[in-house]
Image (cartoon, grey):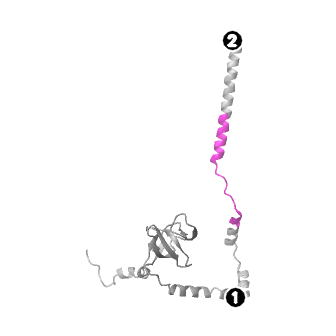
Amino acid sequence: MFTNVLKFILGVLLAIAILIGSGVATALYFMNRTAIPPSKPIFPNDNQSQKIQSPKPTGKVAQSQSTASPSPSASPSPTPTESPTAEASPQPLPAGAYRGKVTWSQGLSLRSEPKQDAERVGGVGFNQKVVILEESPDKLWQKIRQEDTNQEGWVKAGNTQRVDDNEETQQPQAPQENQQPENQKPENQ
């Protein structure tokens, strides 16, 4: 009888040990599977960008294309001539308005009214040149106009920086003023 009790106790302990061992093994298996990073997914638009960058025409194909169609070389020439004329004659600013640029790195949302829940009518990118037309009475919003599209809207104040027109022309001259002629010696300080 004592041996039967001993066999029963050893059987229960062995069963518990097998259950614990299999549970630990299963847990380790799944923990290791989740620690492996998945492979990089491939999307259909990824293949298009690779196709655009990788194939370049060979010498014979490029020569046949350039001699066969002289019209593409004529079309880019009007585009560069238009942009300097647009920059050379900037629009006059309304009273109280000034030029600026966007300083928020993620760009700004243009709103139809000076409210957070107002309709979004467009956006302005980082470092884009704008004209600040006015400020709201509570000074929390600014009405701006994009220089390139003339689209107007409201943005949160503090996300633009004033830019002087003279600042752009003086910057290249500043290093020249600090240089001294070769025949002069620097003054001792």
Q: Earlier in the sequence, mark 1 or mark 2?
A: 2
The answer to if 36 sits in the magenta stretch is yes
Residue drawn at point x = 47 percent, y = 75 percent: 132
- Can see residue 102? no
Residue drawn at point x = 66 percent, y = 52 percent: 38
The answer to if 34 sits in the magenta stretch is yes
Q: As shown in the figure, which amino acid type bears the numbered disc 1?
A: Ser
Task: Name the disc covering residue 177, or none.
Answer: none
Residue drawn at point x = 72 percent, y = 87 percent: 69
Q: Mark 2: which secondary structure? A: helix
As drawn, 63 above or below 6:
below
Examine the image and state in which quarter residue 135 appears. bottom left
Q: Residue furthest top?
A: 1
Check disc 1 and report the residue beneath it.
71
Horizontal side, residue 187 vs residue 83: left or right: left
> Magenta region: which residues?
23-47
Task: Between residue 179 and residue 118, name the one nearer to us.
Answer: 118
Question: Whole-percent x and y of residue 143?
Answer: 49, 73
Task: Between residue 58 and residue 169, name the one nearer to us.
Answer: 169
Question: Whole-percent x and y of residue 126?
Answer: 52, 70
Horizontal side, residue 117 vs residue 189: left or right: right
Q: As shown in the figure, which amino acid type bears the numbered disc 2?
A: Phe
Task: Between residue 71 and residue 58, name the one nearer to us.
Answer: 71
Image quadrant holding the C terminus, namely bottom left
Task: Between residue 64 and residue 17, name the one nearer to us.
Answer: 17
Question: Whole-percent x and y of residue 15?
Answer: 69, 26
Check disc 2 and report the residue beneath it.
2
- Can see residue 85? yes
Question: Whole-percent x and y of residue 41?
Answer: 68, 58
As drawn, 95 above or below 13:
below
